Image (cartoon, rainbow, N blue to C red):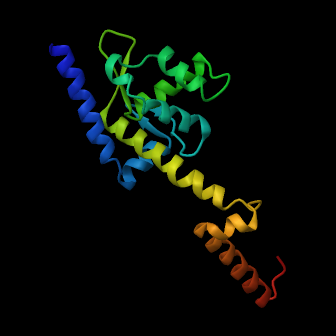
Amino acid sequence: MQVGHAINQRLLDHQLDACQCAPDATTLERVVLPSTHDGLPAPGLRFGEPRTMALLACLCCYEHLFAGLTNRSLRALIAGLIPDYGARQMTYDLRRLRRKGFIQRIPRSQRYQLTSEGRRLAVFLTKTYTRIVNPALAELDPTLPPDTAQRAPLATAWRAFEHALEDRIKQAAIAA
């Protein structure tokens, strides 16, 4: 009974954290740039890097709330997104996640649990990448058919900017 209540409470806490996920600039800087944690190097989790984004997306999975996560369980999820993802890479990534405060080791086990800040940041970075960055980059693709580009506000604005910049360069008589 008590175990079930604790699991339900963790699930509810993480769902609430996911709703209020926008971090401040200092927190983002701490996560994406290399730093030191307890005197040990903590490599950055570079936003947009495919391996990092796959890692963060897999952290958003709710199954970790119940049993925690292990090298094997998280590696299986990531290997579904990145071919040839191995145990050594997972060990390195777990170390990065631990030093950046995303996960913490469950005492006397080889399992980790996601911290509330770790879940919040993983959700924020994953949502930002999949809902904003990827669609925006697709709209900016120069090979996008003109009729499709005209329906995309970002593509229209970007192309207008490019044309205005080209005109400015021509007016200044600077060879581009």
Task: Where is residue 99? Give x, y as percent.
Answer: 41, 31
Pinpoint residue 44: horizontal percent, then vertical percent: 51, 40
Q: Is residue 175 visible?
A: yes
| Residue at the outermost right position | 175
Q: Is 91 drawn above or below residue 48 in the view shown?
A: above
| Residue found at the very far left of the displayed protein | 2
Taking the view exactly as shown, the residue that stands out farthest to the bottom is 171
| Residue for point 63% across, 56% down | 137
Q: Quadrant of residue 89?
A: top right
Q: Residue at x 47, y 25 (%)?
A: 95
Q: Is residue 134 left or right of residue 38?
A: right
Q: In the displayed structure, does residue 156 sit left or right of residue 17? A: right
Where residue 65 sits, quadrant-wise, is: top left
- The percent position of residue 41, horizontal first and vertical second, equals 48, 33
**Would you place residue 115 above or below residue 49 in this image?**
above
Give how far across and how far down residue 138 sits, in percent.
Answer: 65, 55
* Front one among 110 and 4: 4
Question: Is residue 91 visible to the viewer in this orientation of the structure?
Answer: no
The N terminus lies in which quarter of the figure? top left
Q: Quadrant of the C terminus?
A: bottom right
Badge count: 0
Identify the image quadrant of residue 161: bottom right
Residue 4 sits above or below residue 15 on the image: above
Q: Which residue is more in the foreground, 10 or 85?
A: 10
Q: Is residue 71 above or below residue 165?
A: above
Residue name at image x 24 percent, y 22 percent: 7
